[in-house]
Image: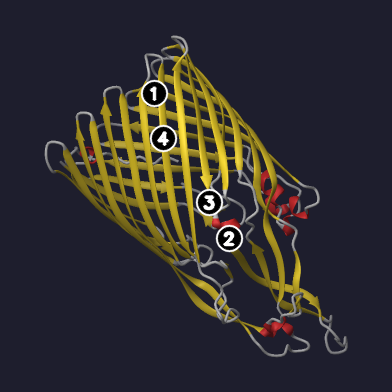
Amino acid sequence: MNIITKNSNETLGQFFEIANGQYNYKEADHRYGFQLNDFTTARLSVKGVQSDYYSFNDDEWNNYNVAFRTDYIEDDQFLTFQLGGYHTKSEHSSWYTYDFLDQPLHPLYPDTAIVANPSLLKDYSRGVYSSLNFGKTLDDTQYKGSFWIDNNSRTEPTANGQYSTVNGDLLMIKQRNEQNELTMGIGARYTRLKIPTAKANYYTGMQPYQRLAYERVQREQIYNVFSQLETQLTDKLTSSLGVKVEHFTRNDTTELQPQLRLHYKVTDDHQLWTGIGRAVVTPSAVDSTTDMFVLGNAIASIPNCDLSQHPSCVGMYPAMNYTAGNKDMDNESVVTWDAGYRGKITDTFSLDATVFYSEYDNLRMIDDGRWICTYGYCEDGTTLPGGTAIFRNSYSDNLTAQSYGAELALFWQPSEAINFNTSYSFIDTQAECDSRYRTCDTYLNGGYKALYDHQPNHYGSIQMMWTLNPQWQIDWWLKHKGSVSSSLEYYEAPAITTLDLRVAWQQKHSWPLVELVVDGLGSSTYEDMPNKAPLEETVFMRLSWTTL
């Protein structure tokens, strides 16, 4: 992912924006861009957003951020400095914490050993960041560098912690001769994580789910070197051969990530390309050095129960699903081959087509697991309050997958006032894992293979942007996602088609721009994915004004 923001010399002057809509949505934004001297510009921006976290309740969500950027550009050199920070807060009223009572179980009603306490979850996410990018050209060689620092924290139970990262990259691009351009670079990243560990009174005030670590402070480094040679083989054929070597101290592994690409220019308006490459997922603390705890219940027979006193002699005991991190997994990787065509058919119509095939290895799943504590007694000889049962499993890398598909994008501009962007994707994914694991196929035990197998195959969209006259604009975006059918009801999902609409009015350039935006026009409540938060039609108004 590469996010590029505008240079500050492109955003001079004042910019104001306010918006208001359904579900308590409010937004205010101000940006000020200014000239420092002939070569340097800067901008300062502040933004605040408030809304309900979900459309179906009034849980509050707020976000505030401030950012500064300055750019220096002179002849063959540039420098960009950025500094910013953000604060996000969400509140969730339908929340409970739990106390496990350290007392003998009621002989007939073991579920009374746990007490649910209504609570308010306040999730805070805060961070500050700074970056420095620079570049200079000397003769036939470009030198570029990038350094950034990020420090953020989160209180949400599955991501609770503090995270600090320092990253640096240096790049050299040299024109060796008329046919060859060589790129070389090095990079390093240092990360420090501070993750909560289990508290002494762990069974009091428990969250319904939480991620914890045995090692509170964790440090890791990533080092890489890379090189790429781009060669003009003929007047029409260009090749690009590159390789990146990356070392991860988290699991002491070194990965080779090569890439080869060919580009053939049939004519100025028609081009063909193909390539193959390997990429690796950076190892994470989430599945290697942290553990996930989820509270639940276990139904079991009541020992020494008299059927005359209890209708079934079966009780519900407090239980915990404990998923342990695994340091011994190989890194997730993918090898992808793709090929495509890009062409300008007429002056107003062009298309882009791609086919691809990918092989994924060492994908994460959860092993079968086992009960390590029952009726409050654990296999290591310890006892737990409330007759608690614990089911333990761990992450593993026994899942592989294959994915293939095609993508088609069309652009048509029948007149200067209107254009259409249309896209269609077909993607099919099939997963495989060791048949010894029940979690390969059964949702109740994880269902990780089924999770990959049951994904929509068809995605499509049509976007229209129409300037009716100098004052009025109408944009709409029709999106479709195909259905999923399965013998397992959990994975079944209907097709979803939504229409987003934007109507804008601006009397002239110096006047404010007024916009009416409707997401999911006419849509009844739907879920983007099974068992996710429901979505529905959302309407808001936005007013923005730019002064130069």
Q: CA distance from mark 4 to mark 1?
A: 41 Å
Q: Identify the secondary structure beneath mark 2.
A: loop
Which circle's residue, 3 or 4, is located before the other in the chain?
A: 4
Residue 30 appears in the rendering? no
Q: Position of residue 121 (x, y in %)?
A: 48, 72
**Residue at which label 1 appears:** 413
Instruction: Say what amino acid the circle numbered 2 marks.
Output: Thr
Q: Earlier in the sequence, mark 4 or mark 1?
A: 4
- Say which of 161 and 499 sits in front: 161
Q: Which residue is mark 2?
A: 289
The residue singled out by tag 3 in the image is: 249
* Quadrant placement of the N terminus: top left
Labelled pair 3, 4 in contact (Cβ < 8 Å): no
User: Does 398 sit above or below residue 422?
Assistant: below
Quadrant of the rendered image containing residue 22 = bottom left
Task: Using the image, tell me which numbered label, if any, was put on residue 331.
Answer: none
Residue under label 4, please give it: 185
